[in-house]
Image (cartoon, helix red, strand yellow):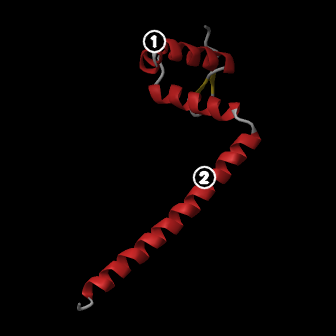
Amino acid sequence: MTKKKVETRTGRTRYSTEFKQQALLRAVKDGVVVTARDLGLEPAQLYAWRSKARQDGQSDEEQRLLHSETARLKRELARLEEENAFLKKAAAYFAKQPK
């Protein structure tokens, strides 16, 4: 596994796609922390590469479906929170009424 580094003006190191893929495969087998230490990387860098690889693996349609499902769940959560607040107010109102 050879590193293909390209130094930029800011001193950031860029790794080739092949290096990243091989590092991720090794991380699955040996663990992220061990692989990062062996390759001289930060574990957060491997986690970021893994996250990006997962996102790239999803098609646009899958991402759109996930976003729409997330939006639907957020709307439902807002509705349920509103209902919960109303029920709390109603319970407080009925608790104050004399019997």
Q: Decide: is 72 above or below 56.
A: below
Instruction: Give the position of the C terminus as an image quadrant.
Output: bottom left
Q: From the viewer's side, name the closer residue of 12 and 84.
A: 84
Tell me what residue is drawn at x 76 percent, y 42 percent.
61
Instruction: Give the position of the N terminus as an image quadrant.
Output: top right
Is 6 on the left-hand or right-hand side of 77?
Answer: right
Picture quadrant where residue 98 is located: bottom left
Can residue 12 be seen from the camera position used here? no
Can residue 83 be seen from the camera position used here? yes
Identify the disc placed on residue 98.
Answer: none
Q: Decide: is 69 above or below 75.
A: above
Q: Residue furthest front?
A: 99
Q: Decide: is 81 above or below 27.
A: below
Q: Residue furthest bottom?
A: 98
Q: Decide: is 78 above or below 88.
A: above
Name which residue type carries label 2.
Answer: Thr
Where in the figure is residue 13, as x and y percent of width and height?
A: 58, 25
Tell me what residue is drawn at x 45 percent, y 12 percent.
38
Number of residues whose C-alpha sits closer than 10 Å to that of mark 1, classed few (under 14), some (14–19) or many (20 or more): few
Where in the figure is residue 47, as x and y percent of width and height?
A: 51, 29
Tell me what residue is drawn at x 46 percent, y 67 percent.
81
Name which residue type carries label 1.
Answer: Asp
Residue located beneath label 1 in the image: 38
Tell me what residue is drawn at x 40 percent, y 75 percent.
87
Q: From the viewer's side, name the closer residue of 50 and 75.
A: 75
Where in the figure is residue 59, as x and y percent of width and height?
A: 74, 36
Q: Which numbered disc flags the more N-terminal residue, 1 or 2?
A: 1
Task: Report the number of numbered marks.
Answer: 2
- At mark 2, the secondary structure is helix
Q: Nearer the viewer, mark 1 or mark 2?
A: 2
Identify the disc placed on residue 70.
Answer: 2
Number of residues whose C-alpha sits closer than 10 Å to that of mark 2, classed few (under 14), some (14–19) or many (20 or more): few
